[in-house]
Amino acid sequence: QQELVESGGGLVQPGGSLRLSCAASRFTLDYYAIGWFRQAPGKEREGVSCFSTSDNLTYYADSVKGRFTSSRDNAKNTVYLEMNSLKSEDTGVYYCAAAILFRHCVHGIDIDYWGQGTQVTVSS
């Protein structure tokens, strides 16, 4: 059973919006820093955002600042990535991840849990 399950990806036109969800099973997300990463075809995986409610820390990549917002619903043990003003360069497979330490989340190292990924395609 996958510990993290993403959903919400799809095809959207440039300028559109999507909301990705990442639901956790078998552990409580509130104890972890939660990150979103993406990987476009032929490119390396890059960090998109990371936040930790326990440390009150948030990180967004420069490429998504002002357009993407991370949030958490503790009651549902789910985190979200709201993506607005989408661009073609936002296309890729998006993964959520959980790490004990915020700095690990930001740098994508020593990640405790990864999701299976969800495809986001921005195209007209």
Image (cartoon, rainbow, N blue to C red):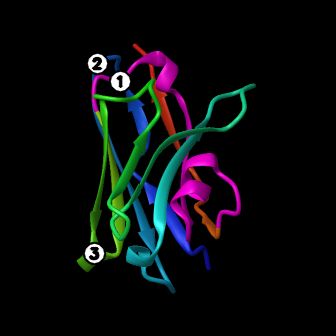
Which residue: 48% across, 29% down?
Answer: 121
Horizontal and vertical percent position of residue 33: 47, 64
**Residue type, mark 2 in image:** Gly
Which residue: 28% across, 75% down?
Answer: 74
Cα distance in 3D space between marks 2 and 3: 30 Å
Up-down: is 113 above or below 81? below
Residue at numbered disc 1: 86
Residue at numbered disc 3: 74
Which quadrant is home to the N terminus? Answer: bottom right
Q: Which residues are magenta?
A: 84-111
Circle 1: element type? loop
Given residues 40 and 105, the one toward you in this image is 105
Q: Any magenta on residue 93?
A: yes
Tell how many labels: 3
Given residues 107 and 7, the one toward you in this image is 107
Q: Is residue 21 left or right of residue 117?
A: left
Q: Are marks 3 and 1 in contact (CB under 8 Å)?
A: no
Query: Residue 71 sits in which quadrant?
Result: bottom left
Residue at numbered disc 2: 15
Horizontal and vertical percent position of residue 4: 53, 68
Q: Which of the two marks, 2 or 3, is nearer to us in this view?
A: 3
**Mark 3 surroundings within 10 Å by alpha-carbon count, few (fewer than 14), some (14 through 19), many (20 or more):** few
**Residue type, mark 1 in image:** Leu
Q: Are marks 1 and 2 in contact (CB under 8 Å)?
A: yes
Mark closest to the chain's N terminus, 3 or 1: 3
